Amino acid sequence: MNEQTTDQKLGAVITGSARGIGAAIARNLAACGYGVSINYVSGEEKAHRLVEEIEASGGRAFAYRADAGDYEQVRSLVEETAHRYGGIRIVVNNAGFSQHTTIDQMSVEDWDRAVAVNLSGAFYAVKAALPYLRKLDWARIVSICSLRAMTGSNHGAHYAAAKSGLIGLTKSLALELAPQITANAISPGYVNTDMNAAALAKNGEAIRAMIPARRVAEPEEIAALASFLASEEAGYITGETINMNGGIYMR
Ligand SMILES: NC(=O)c1ccc[n+]([C@@H]2O[C@H](COP(=O)([O-])OP(=O)(O)OC[C@H]3O[C@@H](n4cnc5c(N)ncnc54)[C@H](OP(=O)(O)O)[C@@H]3O)[C@@H](O)[C@H]2O)c1
């Protein structure tokens, strides 16, 4: 029934992986032996540099431009990954962006774009990869959600709503795709990436004071959990959204 044995390393699709959390996840999965897609939309140079870095460490990677909010582009990313590495075992839905805007200022286009990239992109990647995942005895889907899915946001309702949708998608995938395929999400709080650079530069001290851990997370910490959820050993965890926020959610 299964075309692959569990010790064969196939491909891992990681959306939005040229920088930040996605790049850290790509490094980890490449170090585990997976062939990884370094997907970018604006960061072409960073994507190529990361491919060189992974290859220099003996890993397999390729750079590919695809907009996570466009199904045909995501499908093409998935097909290229499967073609290069003989299949796909892992899908990491990481591509995302936030936009600081109130509900009064938000245009319909702002809303549609945020939902397309932060939520529909995950469905697109899973839909395209499913025929490959289903061939295997085990496969994994990991989505990067956000604290804002639980708390809401007073300056990014579209982002918070899309990330909340990702939790519903994760649970539904977990139910439908069990037992071979698990689906889980991680909800980071503040992570030290470009996404927060401006906020941390302006209010870093106040932000760190709010967090029981008294610091923001490094992308590698999120990647370590993502790698575990993507591993064979994590097969009994499914449908979960794991908060990883230094305790800020208790505040
Ligand atoms: N940083 C945080 O504190 C934090 C907290 C909670 C959740 N998250 C989530 O974590 C994920 C990664 O964020 P990050 O912190 O690593 O942010 P980041 O440093 O800003 O990186 C965002 C990544 O997403 C990619 N991306 C954005 N729009 C895309 C699109 N339309 N198609 C394909 N890729 C796209 C970017 O690609 P390019 O480089 O090509 O532009 C980049 O690789 C996001 O889903 C974010 O919502 C982050």
Image: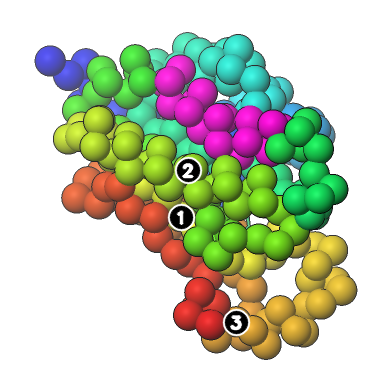
Residue bearing mark 1: 186
Can you see residue 222?
no
The residue under the point 63% across, 80% down is 215
Q: Which is more toward the observer, 116 or 155? A: 155
Residue 217: percent from left, percent from top: 60, 69
Residue 158: percent from left, percent from top: 66, 45
Q: Nearer the viewer, mark 2 or mark 1?
A: 2
Residue bearing mark 3: 211
Residue 117: percent from left, percent from top: 64, 34
The residue under the point 53% across, 56% down is 149
Mark 2: C-beta under 8 Å from nearest atom of ligand 1: no
The residue under the point 48% across, 80% down is 250
Relative to 127, 175 lies left or right: left
Q: Residue 2, relative to residue 216: is it above or below?
A: above
Q: Earlier in the sequence, mark 2 or mark 1?
A: 2
Segment tinted magenta in the rendering: 112-129
Relative to 218, 200 lies left or right: right
